Amino acid sequence: MQIANLEDRLVILNGGGAVDVEQASDGRFGHDPQRIYDRWDEFLEWAREDRVQGVAFDPARLRAPAPRPRQVFAFGLNYRNHADEVGYDHERAAPPVFTKFPTSITGPYADVVHPGGSVDWEVELVVVIGRHARRIQASEAWAFVAGLTVGQDISERDLQHEGELPQFSLGKSYPGFAPMGPWLTTIDELEDPDDLELSCEVNGETMQQATTAQLILAVPQLIERLSQVTPLLPGDAIFTGTPAGVGLARVPQRFLSPGDEVVSRITGLGELRNRIVAGA
């Protein structure tokens, strides 16, 4: 099943169209895409019944499928080839964890304002939590996932590396620096959720290409690691890391400028198309 946020209304994508959940459920479920995660199991039981054909819609109207998570977690250096390209010893230390502030979330086709500095791309698989998870073991972790979506962990490297210690969260949390979408796909729709191909293009040139099978810590391990420390709440988002090919590690370095288009794809999950625009 695929659910989406169509201009702040929760919809199920069916037959190439969109079914408005509030209308189809006669008000049993509301229109707010974020609030559905608090009733995820109940919603799934209802949603998997046969539905009428969806109504055609303009994909440009889609917004982030989890627009207001209470917590946004992100893992850095979680692909060996990315850790290698930036000189991080992944054999000695686990991938670092940071946050992206929820106000950085934007939609799959939204413009992203360039704040100045060295703005970089990072295509990522994003996990959205569907059930309260506390001290979960990796073997049971997938049962706590509502679904998967495509994400971009856009990063301003100057601020990120300002000072003696990195400022990961600040450098990655400008408005629009967390595009997500274009919809949320449930795990049962995927042949192997642990092995998905992802790629990032800038102006049509492929910059990153890998599979999630190359993650140092796979999705179940990430959920286990986080939930040992803090409860994961329904609707929380987890950015799982990016593979090699970021602009920071290129020789010469390459960064985004106004007018650039960033296309982020994951097989079976769709794509994001975000244009970088100049600030006011």
Image: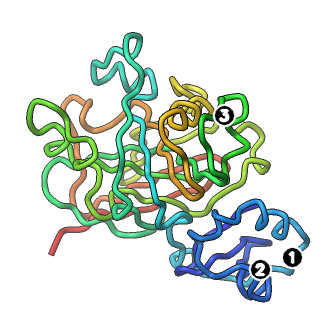
- x 71%, y 79%: residue: 29
Q: Is residue 220 above or below residue 111?
A: above
Looking at the image, which residue sits at the far top?
A: 92
Q: Amino acid at mark 1?
A: Arg
Figure quadrant of the C terminus: bottom left
What residue sits 42% from the left and 59% below the top?
179
Residue designated by label 2: 54
The circle on residue 78 is none
User: Where residue 148 sits in the image (x, y, percent)?
Assistant: 62, 50
At a point 19% along the width and 68% down the height, the residue shown is 278
Name the residue beneath numbered marker 3: 194
Which of label 2 and label 3 is nearer to you? 3
Task: Determine which residue is flagged by label 1.
Answer: 51
Q: Residue 140 sits in which quadrant?
A: top right
Q: Secondary structure at mark 3?
A: loop
Verify CB contact (< 8 Å) between mark 2 and mark 1: yes
- The image quarter containing residue 247 is top left
